[in-house]
Image (cartoon, rainbow, N blue to C red):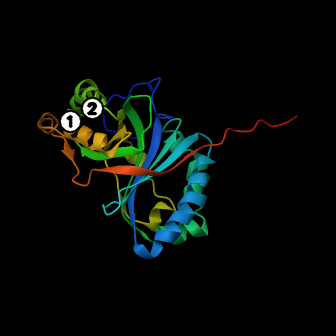
Amino acid sequence: MSGTGANVGAFPSGSALLGAGAVIVWNDVTEAGREQFYDWHDKEHIPERLAIPGFRRGRRYIRPGHSPQWLTLYEADDIDIVVSPGYLERLNSPTPETTRTLQYFRNTSRAVCRIVNSTGSSTGGHMLAMRLGVPAAQCEAMCDYLRTNAFPRALALTGLVACHLYAADQDASHLRTAESNTREFDVPSWVLLAEATTAGAAEQARALIETPALRRLGVVVRSDAAVYALEICRLALPATASSN
């Protein structure tokens, strides 16, 4: 699998995240498919994903009136889980409801990621989500700036409780499966998430992160970065021990 060239350290202890790997999805849904999307995503899709060994938590956020309107984050033990045979089997055997619902998806981004840095031990009901691009030669400098400068300043804000930087694995993200073939999607190279207890704190964090100093490193922040509000959070059920 190919990544971004940045050094990815061990998953930090005390992180608000529940694993070092993730699948992160942005999407819109046409008005005709909105009710079906909610029924399918709440009752079938999230539980199905969390039934895969190694998946730990699924969260979906919304920004009404924004495009893309929804942000979904699936956390897993590590990136091997999100390219595991069990996960790929699900992607290659979509349920009828999955196939029917995905036809309503628009403006989709999907990234299979590994954590590069995670600071803060709480989760928040509001999530700043930023998709980043940066020249390969500047990846390390960007990571260092965020880790030592931008993230500590953001976390000093009242209401800002965690910052995470993910690097997308391009090979894993572009794997073609029966499910991915149902829709077009792009793959961001880097994903920055900041969790907050208030929307205002998340907006303030954006102002502290998206600065001239970041741009001087060649970092491009997509213009559709936004603060989303939590709609649903579901944890994976613990595995039950087999009885003798």
43 vs 186, left or right, is right
Task: Give the image quarter of residue 146.
Answer: top left
Q: Residue at x 53, y 60 (%)?
A: 41
Q: Residue at x 27, y 32 (%)?
A: 154
Q: Position of residue 206 (x, y in %)?
A: 24, 41
**Is residue 124 among what the camera can see?**
yes
The C terminus appears in which quarter of the rendering?
top right
Determine which residue is flagged by label 1. 208
Q: Residue at x 56, y 64 (%)?
A: 40
C-alpha gap between disc 1 and disc 2: 6 Å
Task: Give the image quarter of residue 235.
Answer: top right
**Is residue 89 among what the camera can see?**
no
Q: Residue furthest bottom?
A: 32
Q: Amino acid at mark 2?
A: Ala
Q: Position of residue 209 (x, y in %)?
A: 22, 37
42 vs 243, left or right, is left
Q: Are marks 1 and 2 in contact (CB under 8 Å)?
A: yes
Q: Nearer the viewer, residue 227 or 98?
A: 227
Task: Give the image quarter of residue 92.
Answer: bottom right
Determine which residue is flagged by label 2. 154
Q: Position of residue 24 (x, y in %)?
A: 42, 48
Q: Earlier in the sequence, mark 1 or mark 2?
A: 2
Q: Nearer the viewer, residue 19 or 8?
A: 19
Q: Secondary structure at mark 1?
A: helix
Q: Amino acid at mark 1?
A: Leu
Q: Residue furthest right?
A: 244
